[in-house]
Amino acid sequence: MCGIVGAVTERPVNKILIEGLKRLEYRGYDSAGVALAQEGELHTVKAVGKVANLESKLELAAVKGTTGIAHTRWATHGGVTEANAHPHVSKGQLALVHNGIIENHSSLREALKGDGYEFVSETDTEVMVHLIHQLREQHDSLLASVQAAVKQFEGAYGTVVFDKANPDEIIVARSGSPLVIGLGLGENFIASDQLALLAVTRRFIFLEEGDVARVTRESVEIYNRTGERVERNIIESTANQDNTGKGEYRHYMLKEIYEQPMAVRNTLEDRLDGSRVAVKAFGERATEIFKDVKHVQIIACGTSYHSGMVARYWLEQFAGISCNVEIASEFRYRQSYVHENSLLVTISQSGETADTLAALRLAKEQGYMASMTICNVASSSLVRESDLAFMTKAGAEIGVASTKAFTTQLVGLLMLTAAIAQEKGLNAEHIVNAVKSLPMKLEEALQLANGIETLAEEFADKHHSLFLGRGSQYPIAMEGALKLKEISYIHAEAYAAGELKHGPLALIDADMPIIVVAPNNELLEKLKSNVEEVRARGGIIYVFADKASHFESDNTMRVVRVNHVEDIIAPVVYTIPLQLLSYYVAVIKGTDVDQPRNLAKSVTVE
Ligand code: M6R
């Protein structure tokens, strides 16, 4: 989603800002802009489309500055135009960038218009810069006017503003959208993600909710939501900036698909103790919490929600405790029942998904025994605000379509299942042993790539598709459908195969490919009956099946044979061929695989 980079230095900042924006490109955006202060002048350059367009325009404009702010915009309020791109400017004096949504922008806009402010964009953001400008008249510093302005903003913001009259300082404010200050020597930086600044510093301060900060070349002053001056810890980042290359692969997504055996190995490393899970991998209090837990409530969005759905099958079957799974955007807006000794588990690749974070904050007021997150970003808000955290070690995931983050989440959830089972005195050895075989099983599944690439050609002219699975493979079918629609733009739905005859059978014809996930388990025969129902109605079926499942390819059925795998880890393994299918279909269709249209990597607005 939107990205922010800012710098206050003695050297020209153009390159720092553009490089920072490029590092955030993978998050998804549709326009970009920069504002620079130099010798009392404010220069603004904006471009629709890629950061490379902005870079060229900036070179042509031949403007430079030693203080600057830059932004990639993912449109929410107002179309994709230069006028709507950030930075927004008030009276030629203040420049501001913003991530998030100001929900009361309409009333603020009307009031500011009444006071003579002229609006040039359709965005919610423009009210921020005008309001700060208006309040500047009543306050003796930009910091004080930002502190006054944020009291009037409803919604979410991570924002950065500077005044061309005093370019030696930038003011930043965070509520609901992350911001990090990067510390340099005689220069300081700001960004919505540390990744943007790894080329210039490794020392970071992560702002907390409600913080407003004044950043100059030499100093950083932070004030909390009540206006008190506070100190925040300086964190030395260990993030790897080299993770961001595509290497020999055509797309990040393909690289990340192939990285899955290693990502799973890394996630397991040091987390197993013989045939037991090392419970401390979840946090200091994990043992005491897991002993007492009677119910697990999982909250997540998108792909992460699908991993939670798989975990419900595992937790109820192998740890013997009840589990509910809910989409964060639904959970946060309804009155839900909190079971006795209930553990709240959020799942997120980014750790910054607005709905998931809001659901965690809400749940903390609702009497859960503890909160836990399964997350891929150690410095994220979800990790910092949860009682327990299990870090997936997938490494940076750049492709918008989540792949290795998903499979490592599944590994984390299997470990959670085993850990709770263990603490309750149940035997979890079979789970741990199965998990240990996963990297090898994933390697084997990747060998299906060539056959799947050929199969993908049959999907290129299709507009709709249906994915079927049963049991813990139903959420895998859902994940397969999400992957296909995200990157190939083919409409894809998933159904629990037993539901077919309750409606979706009406859709079946030769133009609707049916993708079936069919490991050899106790549901296989049931699933075969569902497949026959489709065949009888002329559907073309693509089955991903165990070698021993006895499906045979013919003119209505294509069978992709997957090596036998233990049922408990089958959801992880069967994910791979579905990812490959989506990938190759998207490549054949020529879509922007890594940055599919309209989507963002980190969904920081609700
Ligand atoms: O960062 P999160 O895991 O919380 O993100 C949740 C979803 O936005 C994300 O999984 C989304 O569905 C991906 N595009 C899936 O590929």
Image (cartoon, helix red, strand yellow):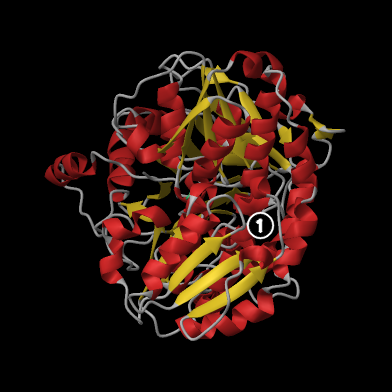
Instruction: Name above or below for residue 147 compared with residue 302.
Output: above
Residue placed at 52% from the left, 54% from the top? Answer: 476
Instruction: Name above or below for residue 347 compared with residue 564.
Output: above
Q: Give the image location of residue 425, x and y in percent.
A: 71, 18
The residue indicated by pointer 1 is 573
- Between residue 447 and residue 74, name the one nearer to us: 447
- Point out the image quarter for the C terminus: top left
Q: Is residue 34 visible?
A: no
Label 1, residues with CA under 10 Å away: few <14, some 14-19, many ≥20: many
- Between residue 398 and residue 338, name the one nearer to us: 338
* Secondary structure at numbered mark 1: helix
Under mark 1, the amino acid is Val
Residue placed at 24% from the left, 57% from the top? Answer: 122
In the image, is 110 to the left or to the right of 428?
left
Residue placed at 62% from the left, 28% from the top? Answer: 319
- Between residue 172 and residue 479, name the one nearer to us: 479
Q: Give the image location of residue 381, x and y in percent.
A: 55, 34
Q: Give the image location of residue 598, x and y in percent.
A: 39, 64
Quarter of the rendering containing residue 362 = top left
Instruction: Name above or below for residue 381 compared with residue 31.
Output: above
Residue placed at 47% from the left, 55% from the top? Answer: 526
In the image, is 123 to the left or to the right of 65?
left
Quarter of the rendering containing residue 32 = bottom left
Q: Give the image location of residue 543, x and y in percent.
A: 54, 70
In the image, is 464 to the left or to the right of 304?
left
Mark 1 sits near ligand 1, with its Cβ under 8 Å away: no
